[in-house]
Image (tube, rainbow, N blue to C red):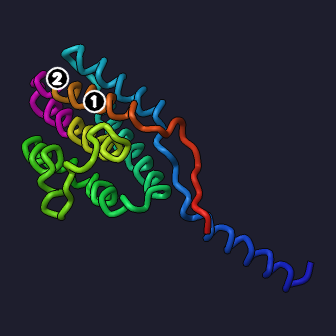
Amino acid sequence: MSTIAKSAGLAAVFVFSLGNMSGAIALDKERYLELATATIKKADGGFVSNVHKLIKQQEELIKIGVEGAKAYIVTHPEHADLLNEVINNADSMKRMTLDEIEDQWHMGKYMKAKGYDLDKFDHFGELFSLMDAIIHPATSFISLKEYKRTRNVDYLARASAELSEVIVHVKHIKSGKATTQLSSN
């Protein structure tokens, strides 16, 4: 094969790769529900010996939520700014206190300060549910960290409540198992 043909082949692979960079993995609903249910079951037991494992599961839930939100943006670019606010703040949410995350994200003060009117969206619509698929496990993450620090079972109850609520939301998300969605370039 000539050098020109090899170069052309590499260029084609590079262009193909760039064209597919906008692909996103849809929310893996099955895995999300599995992890959330497993956390609830452990938290409802009233004592957790391996809280580190549950904390890691919350991180995975957040990651799945972020992937789902990114996939939604591909097909609903009109909501990109709103969802990107949640996506870009997912890690900082985990560093908040329970009162802070409640005030800023559950009550919507952060989004209102950014100019978003959350009241115009269906609370159980796909957009809101995807936001909650990130916010609720972040809240559960904080609760479990507090449980680890204090061993106060009230934090387990809070983690369970957060995930029980988000399960209802996740069931409203149309995406099923992880699928690749590519935008046309």
Q: Which residue occupies the foreground of this view, 150 or 39?
A: 39
* Mark 2 surroundings within 10 Å by alpha-carbon count, few (fewer than 14), some (14 through 19), many (20 or more): some
Of all residues shown, which one is farthest toward the right? Answer: 1
The residue positioned 52% from the left and 49% from the top of the image is: 25
Query: If you read the primary sequence from the N terminus, does the residue marked by circle 2 or circle 1 appear first?
Result: 2
Q: Nearer the viewer, mark 2 or mark 1?
A: 1
Main SS, magenta residues: helix
Q: Can residue 34 be seen by looking at this rendering?
A: yes
Amino acid type at circle 1 is Leu
The number of numbered badges drawn on the structure is 2
Amino acid type at circle 2 is Ala
**Span shown in magenta:** 142-156
The residue positioned 27% from the left and 25% from the top of the image is: 164
Q: Is residue 10 left or right of residue 138?
A: right
Q: Point out which mark residue 71 bears.
A: none
- Image quarter hosting the C terminus: bottom right
Q: Is residue 52 above or below residue 134?
A: above
Q: Position of residue 93 (x, y in %)?
A: 21, 50
Question: Can you identify the residue that label 1 sits on?
Answer: 163
Q: Is residue 14 left or right of residue 71?
A: right
Q: Indicate the secondary structure of the residue bearing disc 2.
A: helix
Q: Position of residue 146 (x, y in %)?
A: 13, 35
Q: Position of residue 80 (x, y in %)?
A: 37, 61
- Please identify the quarter of the rendering in which residue 50 is found: top left
Q: Indicate the secondary structure of the residue bearing disc 1.
A: helix
The residue positioned 33% from the left and 56% from the top of the image is: 83
Q: CA distance from mark 2 to mark 1?
A: 10 Å
Of all residues shown, which one is farthest toward the front? Answer: 120
Q: Point out which mark residue 157 bears.
A: 2
Q: Which residue occupies the foreground of this view, 67 or 172?
A: 172
The residue positioned 80% from the left and 80% from the top of the image is: 8
Q: Position of residue 121 (x, y in %)?
A: 27, 48
